[in-house]
Every structure is written in structure tokens, then in C-alpha cells.
Image (cartoon, rainbow, N blue to C red):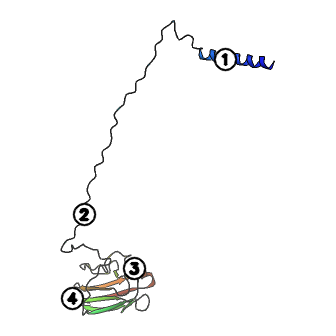
Amino acid sequence: MKRTRRRFLAVLAAGVTGSVAGCGGDGRSETPTETATRTSTATPTETATVTETATPTPTDTATATATPTETATATATPATDPDQVVAVAPDGFVFAPETFEVPVGATVQWRWEGDFHNVKPEDGGAPGASEWTGTPGSESKTYRTGYVYDHTFDVPGEYSYYCHPHQSLGMVGSFTVTE
């Protein structure tokens, strides 16, 4: 019986294999069919061309080229022999002397002995014809110890000035330019 079963299975397997192989029929078709054929066509692809540009190589020159450099703080050449010297903050928030008098054409020199101060005329603190504006820069521009500011006064009259950051602490001064 074992043999019969094996034989049966072998015949069955052969039949199934033959059926599967021949499931398409005998290869002949009563109705002609169209078969689409695909043809692969190569399409040219554009390739980007990279052009290299030569970078100029620096060359040494026989003489140095001057490069302008900004100065961080405007510095005036101090007068060698000013007519009046005013110390800025020698002992706290003061000008020393606080008041003085000079003739027309005199040069007044302010010398910083403390940091973060400036000299600015009060509103209406200079005669109308005077062009005096105090230290260079805005009211918030301050200077440090060692800074020197000169101005020659050609317009007679009463002048009053202050240190902008310390005016509320009483750091004010005045002077008179006489004819």
C-alpha cells in the first residue's frame, strides 16, 4: 500500500506539473492579439559646466600702501601755554576753578583728572555769536583721565557749562570773557 500511495502521488505530481506548464494552451491563439513593444530611447541630459576663475595672487610691492585708520577719539593738540587751566573732576564732581575770567582771545584748557566727564555749554550758556559747543561729540560722549580739551574764546560775554552725566550732582562751571 505504501507503494501504491507513492505511485499515486508521483503520478499526481507529474500531472499537476504538466497542467501548470501547459495552462497557456498549445501556444496557438484563434484571435490574434497585439503586443505592445517598448523601446527604450536614451534622452541626452544637459550637464552643467563649471568654469573655474583664477583668483589673483597677491604680489608684494616695493613700497607700503598707506591705509587710512580712523582715530577712536578726536584729539586736538593741546595749547602749550593756555591762559586758563580748568581741572575736570580733581576731587569728585567739580570743575576747578568753578568760575573764572579771561580776556578775548584767551585759550582755556580743560584737563581730565577723572573718568567719564565732558564739557557742554548750557542752553543759552554762551553769547549768541559764539560758536563754542564744548567737547567734541554728543552730550553722552565722555572722556577719561588724561584727556585735554582747548578752546580759544573770541566772543566776549558770560559762559556757563556743565558735565552732562553729572550735572544733577552739581558739576557745573561758568566764566566771563572780557574785552
Residue sitting nearer the eye, 8 or 169: 8
Q: Nearer the viewer, mark 1 or mark 3?
A: 1
Q: CA distance from mark 4 to mark 1?
A: 132 Å
| N-term mark: 4 or 2 | 2
Residue sitting nearer the eye, 41 or 138: 41
| N-term mark: 3 or 4 | 4
Residue sitting nearer the eye, 134 or 81: 81
Image height of 83 relative to 7, above or below: below
The C terminus, quarter of image = bottom left
Image position of 6 (left or right of 87): right
User: Residue under circle 3?
Assistant: 164
Q: Nearer the viewer, mark 4 or mark 1?
A: 1
Image position of 18 (left or right of 38): right
- Type of residue at label 2? Thr
- Type of residue at label 1? Ala
Q: CA distance from mark 2 to mark 3?
A: 53 Å
Q: Residue furthest front?
A: 3
User: Residue under circle 2?
Assistant: 57
Q: CA distance from mark 3 to mark 4?
A: 26 Å
Image height of 35 relative to 148, above or below: above
Question: Dot 3, crowdedness within 10 Å: few (<14), some or many (≥20)?
Answer: many
Q: CA distance from mark 4 to mark 2?
A: 58 Å
Residue 59 lies, in percent from the top left, at 22, 67
Q: Residue at the spot x=43%, y=20% of the render?
A: 37
- Type of residue at label 3? His
Question: Dot 4, crowdedness within 10 Å: few (<14), some or many (≥20)?
Answer: some
User: Residue under circle 1?
Assistant: 14
| N-term mark: 2 or 1 | 1
